[in-house]
Amino acid sequence: MLAVTCLASGNAAYAQEQPGKAMIVLDGSGSMWGQIEGEAKISIARRVLTDVLASSPDTLHLGLMAYGHREKGNCKDIELLVSPSTQSAGQISSLAAEIKPKGKTPLSDAVKSAAEALKFEEEKATVILITDGLETCRADPCALGKALESAGVDFTAHVVGFGLSAKEGRQVACLAENTGGRYLPAQDADSLGAALDETVTQAAAPVQSEPEPAPEKLPTATVSGPESVEIGRQFAASWDGPGEKWDRISLFDPRAANGEGREVTGRRIQHSRSDNQEVLLVAPVRTGTYTLQYRFGPRGHVIGTAPIEVVDAAVSLEAPANVDIGRSFTVEWVGPGGRRDRVQIIDPIANNGEGKVVSGKRLRNDDFDNRKVSLVAPAKPGFYRLQYWNGDNRAELATRQIEVLDAEVAISAPDTVAIGTDFDAEWIGPGGRRDSINIVNPQADGGRGKSVGGKRLTNGDFDNRTVTLIAPAKPGEYQLQYYNGDNRVVLATRPLIVETMAVSLDAPAEVTMGHTVKVGWSGPGARRDRVEIYDPNAKGGRGKVVSSKRVVGANSDDNTVELVVPVKPGSYLLRYWNGDSSVVLAELPISVVTMDVGLTAPPTTEAGTLLSVEWRGPGARRDAVQFFKPADGKVHASKRVFTDDYDNRKVTIKAPKAGEYLLRYWSGDGAIALAEQPISVQ
């Protein structure tokens, strides 16, 4: 991860060093559930925070505060989770992982509370605020910054704006700027990591006190790189020097800060390719002459330099002049191809003309070798801007216009369908890989609507633009919706009426335990529908399905299924179960009655002899006569009743070796012994 540090580069040394103290203030408001590239912002923040803290200095006193994570609508929902201490990185990562966003954004009061916890009026203190939104609790972050700067001994607030627009960023940047801190925008995981790495590293800089003369002699070092590098390109800088913990290779712009110069990027040597003593840096997007620097120790003494020229590069985008709403299209690009570079679609009139990124893709996530990315057009017609975005420098390198055209999107399906039945819906539309035809109950969730079924277009007959859907099990008025998954918007709707139909079961009122019973049914006959025998008294009254069979694949011609009757007598229910909607459409009481079950055999027999045993019982296909030995809990011989003289209710079974056994009638479907008698094998 790129570490952008701004430690002093002078040559003064100091007699005493105290570790820095800092507090991370993490936004836990409900908006943190918003997504970037399909991942919730809170998940990205947790992951990146863990990565950054894993390499943070052990000497740093670091704490964690969060807001908006416990209650909705409460501006006082601010909690100190970890008090500032050394070696707190693991605890901070663990507690951050438990934050569940839900509330408001009292960021000003949270920063103030963090400053007070750091005793900012007595000693140096740094607050690092990570927020994806603006103040929502009637406080002025700009005024707070001035007040904290005035009252603090050496107070600094850095603000990381996660997913904020440029306009929104300006409204919170003043909090940082009024304390001498920095506002760092972050639009994805990588830029968030770079921002956190930078602010945490600055906070770790030792407090300087009692200056004394610089050491008489500093070590020497050399640093080298290419004579020139194109804007935005990654390049390797080689070094030879002390190679200590705090040493780093920096890229210095001597023209910045009105000629005073500033470090624009850098990386610690401990993150370098140790085998060949190289670090990877990314060239800025401003052309000109820069200086590679070897910075030694926590003070950042410059002990080696080399010039490097950053030159312009060809950056361009090639794409169709127009594309239909929701359609995929290909953009060819020329540019640095950095690991954070992206091609993005910008809505130039959004945010009152500030513009907004509506979608995009990293170059590395697509056909990088052929310099192509595949994007999905927005669902709203209009003129948009394609942008080549250099992620490391957070700069636009190339742009071009593209028009998104309106297009026909429609659904064709029956006006009415019966509950639980299959039906086909034909569609016209973009056909994106995430597009689907959904069945929606518009009255559900207090009128907000709820999807109760559907299918992705790619999972249906895509060539013929048809999907097969299953009607809900509840009659009523529904909607079919064409849902464009990439843009998360409905492009077309049509009504659907789901009508009731006769659903019934036909079976004897009484059946004998362990036998099979034929059950007639009428109903939707969907592929997941089944007929069940249900024990309502099982599991302490919660009920349990004890036997079932799907209606599809059974006797489909005459609408019957055969079920195995339980071996436990009692009152049960026959049910028609609609599997797609997980609902019972019909039920019928059925009683399971007992029957005579027994065995007739001699009390003793000889090992290895064939023993004829008469049996009385259900005679189901999995039932068997067994020699069971209680001493070891094992069956030593078994014969299914179906495989022998079934008509005369006899089986011939070979006696096992000598010992004391139980001869038993075993119900295979019920997995229970229904009758048993002792038998001794001599």
Image (cartoon, helix red, strand yellow):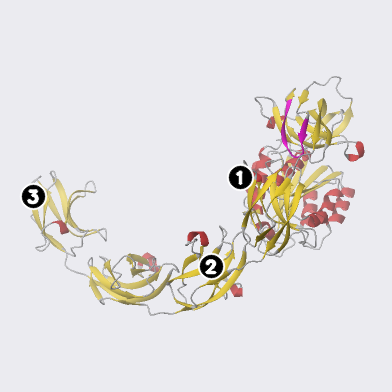
Residue 169 % position (x, y): 79, 54
Which residue position is annotated with label 2? 427
Residue under numbered circle 1:
367
Around disc 3, counting alpha carbons within 10 Å, would you say few (fewer than 14), some (14 to 19), or many (20 or more)?
Answer: some
**Which residue is rendered at x = 66% and y = 66% of the image?**
406
Tag 3, which secondary structure? Answer: strand
Identity of the residue furthest to the top in this view = 217
Q: Earlier in the sequence, mark 1 or mark 2?
A: 1
- Would you say 458 lies left or right of 599 here? right
Q: Earlier in the sequence, mark 3 or mark 1?
A: 1
All told, the count of numbered labels is 3
**Outermost residue toward the right?**
258
Q: Which residues are magenta?
A: 228-238
Q: Is residue 622 rendered to the left or right of residue 260?
A: left
Local SS, label 1: loop
- Indicate left or right for 227 with 514 as reference: right
- Amino acid beneath label 1: Asp
**Tag 1: Cα neighbours inside 10 Å, few (<14), some, or many (≥20)?**
few
